[in-house]
Amino acid sequence: MKTSRPTHEIADILRSTNLPEITSNSWQLRTLYAVSKCRTAAMGWHIDRCNHSDCGKLHLSYNSCRNRHCPKCQGHQREEWIQKREAELLNVEYFHVVFTLPDHLNELCLYKSALLYGMLFKTAWETLSGFGQNHKFLGAQTGMISVLHTWGSNMSLHPHLHCIVPAGGINGSGKWKSTKSKGKYLFPAKAMAKVYRAKFLDALNKVGLLDAPLHEKLTAKKWVVYAKRPFHGPQQVTEYLGRYTHKIAISNHRITDVRDHSVSFLVKNYRKEGNKEICTLSKPEFIRRFAMHIMPKGFVRIRHFGILSTAGKRNYNTTIREQIGIVILSVTREPIKLGVCPICKKGKLITIAVSRDRGPPKHLVNQIDKQNKKRQRA
């Protein structure tokens, strides 16, 4: 389903603001500048011609920044990633588990984000894997696909990990074992929260970040592990992945108004059953919050563990499918079509001119303008 073009864009807000006054972090600045220039002449351009004999139309395109924090560059990456995951789905139910960091750790997350977020992945998997290996609950090696989100609806700092976990695993004999809860829940959420807290505190202590005042605050705080109801089938899993994997702090479609000094956008008020409200921030504050969620350089925010890791799939996928069967999706996705002419839908687009330094040749621009006017009259 084709969505309408947003009225306002993050790139416009970034271009109208003096970014170095808001953040001195060089990596954040580099990212913000890339997003601000996406699909503009500053990124360079290319002209394609359709190779179909009945078409031959020209198409001018400005290059994308391809940055993972850009709201305009996630669609193709998301679809490509989802199609790969669909091919790997196991023929079992999946559970959705969320691990959240308490707000007392927000300051550390800002200044030592790679370390803290790495701990979040590690301790969440250790917690789930430990419960899985326990014969009281499963007695097998399970797996996990995990996606890090660091934001709340209003773009405040709210680090949490969305985990998708199959309802079973492989035991020491290479046999598939299903969870003992008859599909109602994965493992006890309250027990997982206590183990998760202990493991995270131990990890903080080992790197010298757990002083007495922080320890007191974190032990007094209730840590949250939210075990949601299981997905109803593989199709639900892929729809969920589509919503969450390549999501960023805010999309262009949520921005409702941009003025000289302020930005307004839609938020969900979870204290009022998720009702949508308008949040208005100054431009510097809006950009500051957006920048908080830029991942450290090279940090991987989608990770696979256990039988769902690369090694796990290589070692166990065939064995598991022999025992529990394969997944047959009721709805198949259209294959990703790149370089297809958007006008005739038949021909392939062939690049005939490329540049990163200046605007496209005037004779080609004039030709494209005449072509577009002719189409509009038709």
Image (cartoon, helix red, strand yellow):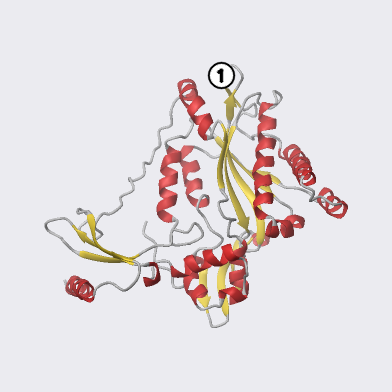
The C terminus sits in image quarter? bottom left
From the viewer's perspective, is 157 left or right of 344? right
Q: Nearer the viewer, residue 182 or 145?
A: 145
From the viewer's perspective, is 64 left or right of 365? right
> Where residue 245 appears, x then y in whole percent?
51, 49
Q: Amino acid at mark 1?
A: Lys
The N terminus sits in image quarter? bottom left
Direction top: furthest residue: 173
> Where residue 302 appears, x then y in whole percent?
55, 46
Residue at the spot 11% in from the left edge and 56% down from the top edge: 53
On the image, which quarter does residue 330 sit in?
Answer: top left
> Where residue 213 appears, x then y in whole percent?
87, 55
**198 to 274, vertically: above or below:** above
User: What kind of element bears circle 1?
Assistant: loop
From the viewer's perspective, is 376 left or right of 334? left
Direction front: furthest residue: 357
User: Which residue corresponds to mark 1?
Assistant: 175
On the image, which quarter does residue 175 sit in?
Answer: top right
Residue at the spot 21% in from the left edge and 61% down from the top edge: 49
Q: Residues within 10 Å of mark 1 (few under 14, many from 20)?
A: few
Residue at the spot 71% in from the left edge and 39% down from the top edge: 189
